[in-house]
């Protein structure tokens, strides 16, 4: 297999120079998927026929000199909580095992306009709730760097397919780190744009004030190209914004290291990557300084009240009436109770129950209301930090990828793996994870950059310059031996 | 803060039937999480406002015009049971 897939810009040049056809690329990517799927279980469904048909249409456009743009003929995988017309959207849940989407998500419609092709739908933690894909009703995805390790989550399938070369890029969704954490674990780039810049219409909602669609890619430039083609105001999403993208005032940037994410609870490995990158930034003339955002330590608690509260409301639609599973029963109420008992997995039930409690009469102010107020304080803290700094830096994750089963006993252990990523969701900030090194056991390590709202393009520029400085050029070592063992 | 947490009441509110073995595990896990979020009690939130949108976007109303949307037929395609263009459910008066 050939894992070493060029960047989107290079592929576009190969197509333009007639050195490669989009259908040949699709065949190669599909071959990679066919080989790795038995090890990784990253795709839930592959779209070979339609993908090949669309690739051949791209072939014709390039032949006639009528190509649409950089994404024409590029194979992209889609997380299975984003609706693609005519295909299943299972959210890796038994509840939606037979649900076929009657419409395209806005981002899917936009990607179709670019001439890109879809490889298929990727595995996730059920309804995007989890950090390892161990919560998928269809079995976990394995990490391409070592199948004994989790790929992260919830967009674990989307990160694994890019890492393994089974797609050139993918779409994920990020509610508390679900793009950045798996990207970090799989050694690829994961970008969560500013909240509201990419439409959520057609993304099955988990926590609406936090959910954001974004790309997972091999390079920062690939992430920029995909973002460029999916961002923009959408009247179908009430939280969509009309972004006015900002640039930093000076070329020499001032970057803050978040002190609270560089202390106990974050591994030495992860901290070392930040120190390595900040040294490179200083060598390149940028100013780096430690800064404190004390309420960052409260972010996990705020998140685990707000996200479950919103999830309990959003998932009330799964009642066995209009779509999804229905368990037989003699009465409506019994039918709903049984359907939700059978259709939802343990983690989803846990979060619905937690959210129901946090919203219930007598506890609303104490839990949900208080969490919303602390969230406002966290947002204010970030606003103040961005008065002094252009960007903030931290590890993406407190540790590199962990082994299957390592964090399933105590829910807090798993939740803590999103410690560094949750703050950006609470404040609606753009944030990106880029791979920067390997741990002693050869698992990827990364750093995270955060910017002020709508600094997406300048954040990507900084990430790209770090990518150049670091030159992370390691690839996962999937061998046939893994398959046979 | 967790003394009033009753798994039977909450599962009833959430319309999820739980088996006895599930209740024990979920109760234990939820108590761990509720104990953790207790830390928020120590934050002074007096006079703090609430932002529903993280970027404080003011929600806009769209024009009152009809636009193309899913057909009736497409909207019902995923339903477990339909009849004459309606969703069918088991009796709701028991």
Image: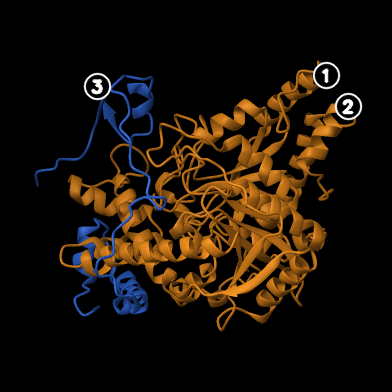
Chain colours: A orange, B blue
Sequence order check, earlier mark of 2 and 1:
2
Neighbours of disc 2 within 10 Å: few (<14), some (14-19), many (20+): few
Chain ID for label 2?
Answer: A
Asked whether residue A330 is in view, the answer is: no
Q: Residue at x 63, y 63 (%)?
A: A448
Number of callouts: 3
Which is closer to the viewer, label 3 or label 2? 2
Label 3 and label 1: CA atoms lie apart by: 50 Å
Farthest residue, direction top = A64
Q: Is residue A18 left or right of residue A333?
A: right
Q: Which mark is residue B84?
A: 3
Label 1 near label 2: C-beta < 8 Å? yes
Farthest residue, direction left = B93
Which is closer to the viewer, label 3 or label 1? 1
Q: Residue at x 51, y 29 (%)?
A: A86
| SS state under label 1 | helix
Q: Which mark is residue A18?
A: 2
Q: Which residue is mark 1?
A: A63
- Asked if A187 appears above or below B73 in the picture, the reply is below
Q: A307 or A157, which is in the foreground?
A: A307
- Asked if A170 appears above or below A447 in the picture, the reply is above
Chain ID for label 1?
Answer: A
């Amino acid at each position: 297999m050939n894992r070493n897939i060029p960047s989107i810009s290079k592929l576009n040049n190969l197509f333009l120079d007639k050195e490669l056809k989009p259908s040949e690329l699709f065949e190669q990517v599909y071959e990679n998927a066919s080989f790795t799927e038995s090890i990784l279980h990253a795709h839930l469904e592959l779209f070979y026929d339609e993908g090949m048909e669309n690739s051949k249409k791209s072939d014709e456009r390039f032949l006639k000199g009528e190509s649409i743009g950089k994404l024409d003929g590029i194979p992209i995988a889609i997380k299975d909580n984003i609706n693609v017309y005519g295909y299943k959207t299972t959210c890796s849940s038994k509840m939606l095992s037979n649900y076929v989407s009657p419409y395209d998500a806005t981002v899917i419609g936009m990607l179709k306009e670019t001439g890109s092709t879809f490889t298929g739908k990727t595995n996730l933690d059920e309804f995007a709730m989890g950090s390892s894909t161990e919560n998928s009703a269809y079995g976990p995805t394995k990490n391409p760097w070592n199948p004994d390790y989790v790929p992260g989550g919830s967009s674990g399938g989307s990160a694994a397919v890019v890492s393994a070369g089974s797609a050139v890029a993918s779409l994920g969704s990020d509610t508390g780190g679900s793009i950045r954490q798996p990207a970090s674990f799989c050694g690829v780039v994961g970008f969560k744009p500013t909240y509201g810049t990419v439409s959520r219409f057609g993304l099955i909602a988990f926590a609406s004030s936090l959910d954001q669609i974004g790309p997972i890619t091999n390079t920062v430039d690939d992430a920029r190209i995909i973002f460029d083609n999916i961002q923009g105001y959408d009247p179908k999403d009430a939280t969509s914004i009309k972004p006015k993208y900002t640039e930093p005032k000076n070329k020499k940037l001032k970057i803050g290291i978040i002190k609270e994410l560089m202390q106990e609870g974050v591994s030495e490995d992860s901290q070392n990557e930040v120190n390595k990158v900040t040294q490179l930034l200083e060598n390149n003339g940028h100013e780096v300084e430690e800064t404190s955002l004390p309420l960052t330590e409260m972010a996990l608690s705020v998140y685990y009240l707000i996200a479950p509260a919103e999830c309990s409301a959003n998932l009330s639609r799964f009642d066995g009436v209009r779509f999804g599973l229905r368990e037989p029963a003699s009465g409506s109420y019994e039918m709903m109770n049984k359907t939700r008992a059978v259709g939802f997995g343990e983690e989803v039930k846990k979060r619905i129950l937690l959210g129901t409690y946090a919203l219930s009469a007598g506890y609303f102010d104490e839990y949900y209301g208080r969490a919303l107020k602390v969230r406002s304080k966290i947002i204010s803290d970030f606003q103040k930090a961005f008065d002094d700094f252009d960007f903030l830096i931290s590890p993406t994750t407190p540790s590199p990828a962990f082994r299957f089963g390592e964090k399933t006993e105590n829910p807090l252990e798993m939740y803590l793996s999103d410690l560094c990523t949750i703050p950006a969701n609470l404040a609606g900030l753009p944030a990106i994870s880029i791979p920067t090194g390997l741990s002693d056991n050869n698992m990827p390590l990364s750093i995270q950059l955060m910017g002020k709202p709508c600094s997406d393009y300048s954040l990507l520029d900084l990430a790209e310059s770090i990518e150049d400085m670091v030159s992370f050029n390691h690839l996962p070592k999937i061998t046939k031996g893994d398959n046979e063992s | 803060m967790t003394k009033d947490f009753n798994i039977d009441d909450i599962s009833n509110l959430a319309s999820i039937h739980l088996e006895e073995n599930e209740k024990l595990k979920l109760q234990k896990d939820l108590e761990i999480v509720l104990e953790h979020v207790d830390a928020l009690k120590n934050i002074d939130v007096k006079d703090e406002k609430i932002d529903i949108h993280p970027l404080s976007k003011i929600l806009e109303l769209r024009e009152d015009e009809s636009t193309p949307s899913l057909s009736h037929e497409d909207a019902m395609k995923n339903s477990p049971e339909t009849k004459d263009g309606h969703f069918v459910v088991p009796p709701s008066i028991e």
